[in-house]
Image: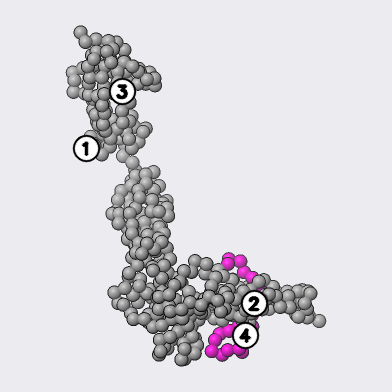
Amino acid sequence: MINVFNTSDTTDYEFIQNQIGTDVYVNGSSSAIRTVITNTNLEQNYDDKKISSISPLNRGDIVLFQDKKYMIISEITGQRYNKFKGIMRYLPHTIIVNDACRFSVLDCYISVSNLGVANGQVLSISDGDITVYSTEYYKDLELRIDARFLLNSQAFKVTGIDRFSKPGMRILSCKKDSINASTDDLVNGIAGGFACPVDIVSNSAELFIGASTQLSYSSAKDAPVRFGSSDEGIAVVDSNGLVTGISEGVVTITIYNATNGRISDTVTINVIIPMAYSINITNDSSAPNEIKNGQSKTYSAEVYSGAVLVTDDSVPVSWQLFADDQVSTTTLATIASQNGTLCTVKNNAASSGYVQLKATLNSDNTVIAWIRIRMRPLF
């Protein structure tokens, strides 16, 4: 005979659990646990069910059963007859609570002081006082007094938070609050949603493949944000808004309020193939490749993008002077002065020998140019 109450052997209960039990998911876990769930006659105003399992259960656990969310509301101090047993209650409401632009999505059930249970999606409220019952196991939940939410197009404000009377549950005392049409997003059910914008300050821009650009952005009340790319094959963006080009194309970068993805802003980035630069070193002198003893000569770096000469200083170069082997240092001449486009070389009293002047593009050190300069006597 099967004895489900045997205190030393779970074999009989495991058999029943396997035969008539059902798989449920607890607290968002991707792994199911096997349970036995039956109806209860405890409270007709609620959709309550009995749940038992060999796996641990705790008050406040959110149970996904038949695509509906339930919360275990009874105290469970340990195994009873080799199994965990409790009462779970259907959570008919989902509210978005706004606390200083930090949003918490709560699955909950609600009671109304003068009408009893608020069961189902239609809620009739006359005196404005309601109590919201949810779980304490949302670890990132940061609710404070005066946090607000919308329910059935009515605003409510949190006036009390009870975390102690029913460990594992969070109980919110709430009062009716006035709707503010300029800040409350009634369409999406977000109290104060319009007062919590995130904004990408940076304009749409072009970005070379392999290059990065830092987006400037703002977030109301310094609420945390996250970023996303519409195509990470074209560009990726990190948690701080640094965008890096991956391949040619157009991509949309989106900033979100980290706790409410409906609040967002976008910017378009056009990722392009880097321009092919080249450098030509010139000098106006009739003898540009020589400097006489004790004299100086100024050289200019002409930077080309493809076949087009860059006429401004947007692509500067750096200058270096070497011996004729393009590696060793030299004492025949020195760089007297330089900037991003010009370099003045002085002959250090040398009457013979050669030096090599090198120009390197600052933005790409693979783009270089050399000019070989002869040291000559003054006469």
Query: Residue flagged by tag 3: what amino acid is it?
Result: Leu
Q: Which mark is residue 357?
A: 3
Dot 4: within a 10 Å radius of its alpha carbon, few (fewer than 14), some, or many (20 or more) residues?
Answer: few
Q: Which is nearer the eye, 64 or 127?
A: 127
Q: Which residue is mark 2?
A: 76
Which of the two discs, 1 and 2, sits closer to the camera? 2
Disc 1 to disc 2, how far (Cα)? Answer: 75 Å
Circle 1: element type? loop
Mark 4 vs mark 2: which is more N-terminal?
Answer: 4
Give the residues drawn in magenta, as a range: 29-49
Q: Residue at x 21, y 36 (%)?
A: 311
Disc 1 to disc 4, how far (Cα)? Answer: 80 Å
- View extreme (bottom): residue: 114
**Residues tagged 2 and 3 counted as in contact (Cβ below 8 A):** no
- Rendering coords of residue 2 (x, y %): 78, 80
- Rendering coords of residue 192 (x, y %): 35, 72
